[in-house]
Amino acid sequence: MVNSRAKGARAERELTNRLKELGYTARRGQQFCGANGDSDVVCTELAHYHIECKMVETLNIDKAIDQATRDCQNKTPIVVHRKKQRPWLVTMYLEDWIKLQKDEAKRSNCSE
């Protein structure tokens, strides 16, 4: 059986590397059993998000988003997750996604 802490660290490193490939500045968060409230992955350009990273075949998304929400402080909670051989996905609350869309629309209107 794979050590879950090591598996989690491997997922965080993989996500960090993927974000770097996409041009972002990212690093693993400092994890102390989740007690400090840090994101699993810290990304400068996505600093307003609390990133909960999961790489499992069967994800309890409710439990994962609850964990992100509990730890997020004043940030927007998201769960970035994937299964083996599948691309990364992002799960967030609908209201947060709508806010993101409205913010993007405002930025687009300002740049015209």
Image: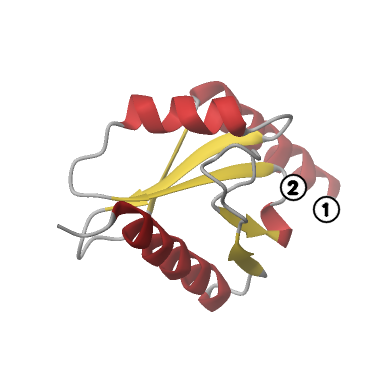
- Residue found 60% across the figure and 37% down from its top: 35
Kind of element beneath mark 2: helix
Mark 1 and mark 2 in contact? Answer it, CB < 8 Å: yes
Give the labeled residue for mark 1: 111
Q: Residue 54 placed where, x, y %?
A: 37, 49
- The residue lying at 54 percent from left, 40 percent from top is 34
Q: Amino acid at mark 2?
A: Ser
Residue 65 position, x and y percent, is 45, 30
Q: Secondary structure at mark 1?
A: loop
Say which quadrant the N terminus sits in: bottom left
Q: Amino acid at mark 1?
A: Ser
Residue 103 on image: x %, y %: 72, 37
Residue beneath disc 2: 108
| 44, above or below 72, in the image | below
Q: Is residue 51 above or below residue 24?
A: above
Mark 2 burial class by Cα count in 10 Å: few <14, some 14-19, many 20+: few
